[in-house]
Amino acid sequence: MRGILKARDKIISILIFTLILLGPLSALAQSSSIPASTEITFISYNGNDANGILAFEHGQIAFYAYAVPPSEYTALPPGAKAYLMPSTYYDILVNPLNTTFGFNPFQFQQVRFALNFIANRTYFVDNILHGYGIPTITLYAGEQCILHIQNTLAKYANIHYNFTYANETIYKVLTAHGAQYINGKWYYNGKPITVYVFVRTDATVRREYAEYFIAQLQKLGFTVQQIQGNLQKEISFVYGSDPANTTWNILIEAWGGTYGYYDAGLVEGLYGTLAGDAPFTSYYGLTFGTYNDSKYESPLLLHEANEIDNWSLKLIQSQFTSAAQYYQLINDIVNVGINMSVRIGLGMSLTPEYVLSNINGVYPNYAQGTLLNFQTYLEIANGTYPNITIGVRYLSQGSANPGVGFTDAYTDEIANALFTPQYLTIPGSGYPVPYIYTYKIVNLTPHAVVPVPSNALWWNPVKQQITRVPPNTTAQMAVIYNLAPLINNDKWADGQNITLADIIYQYIVASEMSLNSSNPIYDSEASSAYGPSLQTIKGFKIINSTAIEIWGNDWFFDPTAAVTSLFLAFNPLGYAAEPAAGYFPWQVYVGMKAVVAEGKAAWSEGTAQSKGIDWLNLVSPTDVGYIISALQNVSSMGYIPKSLLQVENLSNITLVTPQQAIAGYQAALSFMKTYGNALIGDGPFMLVAWNPSASPPFAKIVRNPYFHLVPPAEALSLPEIFSISFSVPSTVTVGQTLNGTIMGTPAGSTTAQPASNVTVYLELLYPNGTIISSLQEMTNANGQFTFTVPTNLSPGSYLLTIAAYQNTSILINPVTYTLVVLPSITTTTSTTTTSTTTSSITTTTSISTTTSISTVVSTVVSTVISTVVSTITTSASNVGYLAAIIVLIIIIIVLAVLLLRRR
């Protein structure tokens, strides 16, 4: 496409390219509204949060880009602004395999499930997160999907801290399998049953909760041994090891950027094996994407794993025809995932990140869970001063490559400045907004009946080349994507034009590394991550120099979500940093492919470890040197990949000329030699310095003068955090109306105000969690809403769950109240008859009641006692028992007062 857009007649010399490359630095002073800052420096504190906090308190950095509990701050700078967002999801990862190193008590599902009752999510949120969090038993916390899985979550309403229940369950299971409980300690074959807990010493929240959980395990009678380490050790020791042949049992996990609007990927990737994140195997995916451990698994676990992955594939391949079927699949996965208890939910942190008062343009993006997101990079400004310094925990704890790199949040956060995402998300909801393209939906149907034309192209995984699609190919979707917004308003950081060749070649490379194990750049972890999505692509066709039509089986009931998902399936690279960090000039992919094919480096850490080679890293001097060497070998001849030539030949359209290929190679080489990295992106900034060994370690990004892509307005809306005020008296009667108020606090503010036009979701449940009714209300201009106790409710105790959200601020933080319902007391008062005569006045008064007060008392007391006894019986803590007794006493007092009044 470079030839179609702006063909150049002559090969430009290396000298001119060097001048063009150096041009960006001199051009930084030019007037431009985006990005708002000229230069951003990142200072790494190497995991020392105290030093990062101290630097912020002294005004040395704009903010410390890590969610640290407020208790860690001793003093905040004047006017510091707090940005609250669902930044990190926490869970307990349990090794479920019958390991070879000893007796693993968690190979038994009942034992794993019992851990739910010692997890103590209330303690986690209140004591570890200091109240800044949302507790959860599942992978979802605060997301829109919560509204659609209430029927499943209600089944587990009785899960709360109950050490006695956990202890009794574990005792029954382990003794039945030959373990011995002696003097308060567990033994198997005469040896203590040792539980190995990996403790992240560089993460305060995870370390503190791990210490609490270790105490619980010891209280159960297990011998506990800690394995201490940082993120890098965690990645290799846990995720990079075979769970059947390793010494870890428990890990407190933390995941950034897990929040989304339609978030099926969360359960697909973390409950199932398809994304290579699970410590067990199914017929569809391997343990941690690498090891086949099915022989070490219980039949039940293997069965459940297959169920989850089967449902996940239906989600991935759009094998549903309505929103109801979509959410039923998610409910099915969540139900089995909770039962499986390999990942046990703890909660989502809402820990504030503080920013200096003079820093503007900061966006707490819920979907990305970080202040260092694309919108912030576009808008952040330090008054009239062009430069900003930001503190980070680490520059990186992983690797930067678009295959299976970008696995850690630190690398991703800096990458967010260097690459333009396919779509943006509304900060407070995670709803997708197309960005680099406009689109036209040609066909959108839940059934694969859309014919794919015979001249459409695809990557043929058997022939491993671009061919025409097979005859009679059909799809669910056909969408024309016009990438003119990207191509006309943006360039690569090395100054080269972005063309369709770059877009199409990413699809080809992703297919090569994912769809056929005989390919020299194939990687099993890449296959797990990208293979299912790529298989939904049924064909593509070039329309013109900026537009491409794509056919695929990625139907969705929301057209916008369907469009963005289909394009992401076509251009999936970037791993956790998708949909941004996969975009590189095709020439850089040529270099990366050569390095991987020659066995000098690998896309994934697991493959790198197994082969004893580098995990490809585009900021590593060694790997960048490999890429430079590879490109030097092909640049002079103007090498164009065979697959791109196949696209040209079959389409009769020129994508790139040899001269343009040479120009691109020279530009990329000049950039890498000048700046020492191969992160040649298309974002608002480019990386010009990366020094992890300096004291302190630092990186520097400067404005990319070639970037002029304006974001849509809806992607720059600040979210609000809603709080619920709802007054519930000690007892209520049927038909009684209760009042509540929703207050909203805008991001960066500490002032709450009544929130109008907020959706209030109310759910009435029995004490065991069975749903009685659900309804929605809208707040009025004063932020108020009402709830009327249904007239058909029997006397007793009920639960009322309330959540509030808006389309632009969808964070769901439900609050549950107890309603003690009394029966209505209906009285009928009849006549006062007056007869008047000349001699006397006779008055007759008759009062009759439909229910005598004694009957009322008898009914209420009987019902309440029955309810309380039931509550006590099913109660999971002394707190529940005490609460039930208090409710009973209050009701008896109220009834006594009623009796006295009747007398």
Image (spheres, grey):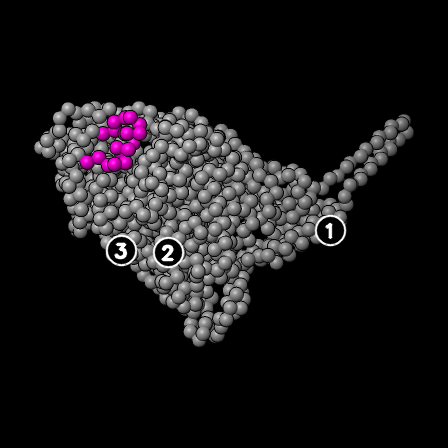
Q: Is residue 276 above or below residue 434?
A: below
Question: Label 1, on which residue?
Answer: 858
**Residue toward you, 801 or 700:** 700
Q: Which residue is mark 3?
A: 611
Question: Looking at this rendering, what residue extends furthest in the right direction?
Answer: 839
Instruction: Specify the amino acid type for callout 2.
Output: Tyr
Query: In this figure, which residue is indicated by the disc labeled 2?
Result: 291
Asked whether residue 649 is drawn in magenta, I would say yes
Does 360 sit above or below residue 9? below
User: On screen, 730 above or below 735?
Assistant: below
Is residue 570 rendered to the left or right of residue 828?
A: left
Q: Which residues are magenta?
A: 639-656
Q: Which amino acid, mark 1?
A: Ser
Res 807 → quadrant: top left
- Tell me which numbered mark, 2 or 3, is placed earlier along the sequence: 2
- Looking at the image, which residue is at 23% across and 29% down? 656
Q: Amino acid at mark 3?
A: Lys
